[in-house]
Amino acid sequence: QVQLAESGGGLVQPGGSLRLSCAASGIIFRRAAMGWYRQAPGKQRELVAQITSGGSTNYADSVKGRFTISRDNAKNTVYLQMNSLKPDDTAVYYCNARYVAKDYWGKGTLVTVSS
């Protein structure tokens, strides 16, 4: 059974930083493409960042230069370092694993950027 468990969300002031973590189980992690998506109230879920099994990365234009995705295959964990946070970054952030042509999702972690 595939499980993705996000952590690290919370309330942060504009300009602040947070690091999200997603621990995966039930897959051969090093073979999975991993990603972070987010969904703000009243909006559709959108891609934030992706990292392939080989370590190539892709970012949404809105977060380029502020967010960094990384992975630790020894810990079966993917991270999202978020810096210079803005109120528009407020959303539920979901971890995604693409493995053997299937998509798996975590339950999400809430990030609120507010003063």
Image (tube, grey):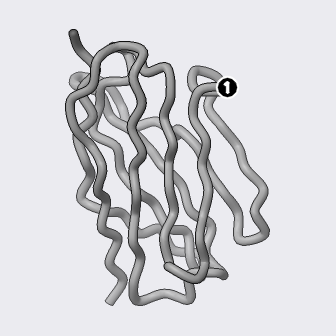
Q: Quadrant of the N terminus?
A: bottom left
Percent of width and height locating residue 56: 78, 56
Name the foreground residue: 48 vs 76: 76
| Residue labelled with disc 1 | 65
Which residue occupies 42% across, 15% down? Answer: 15
| Nearest to the observer: residue 40 or residue 102 | 40
Binning the other alpha carbons within 10 Å of mark 1 as few (below 14), some (14 to 19) or many (20 upward) gives few
- Residue 29: percent from left, percent from top: 56, 81
Vertical comparison of 3 with 47: above or below: below
Number of labels in the image equals 1
Percent from the top left, x then y, of residue 39? 33, 35
Question: Please, is residue 26 above or below residue 37 in the view?
Answer: below
Q: Residue at x 59, y 26 (%)?
A: 66
Residue sitting farthest toward the top:
115
Horizontal side of 87 relative to 74 (left or right) equals: left
Locate residue 72: give its quadrant.
Answer: bottom right
Answer with the quarter of the image where residue 96 lies. bottom left
Judged from the image, the secondary structure of the residue bearing numbered disc 1 is loop
Residue at image x 50%, y 79%?
75
Closer to us: 72 or 47: 72
Quarter the C terminus occupies: top left
The reply, left or right, for residue 86 in relation to residue 73 is left
> Residue 67, position in %: x, y?
57, 34
- Please state which amino acid type lies under the numbered disc 1: Gly
Between 110 and 102, the one nearer to me in the picture: 110
For image coordinates 66% across by 57% down, the residue present is 51
Q: Is residue 70 left or right of residue 37?
A: right
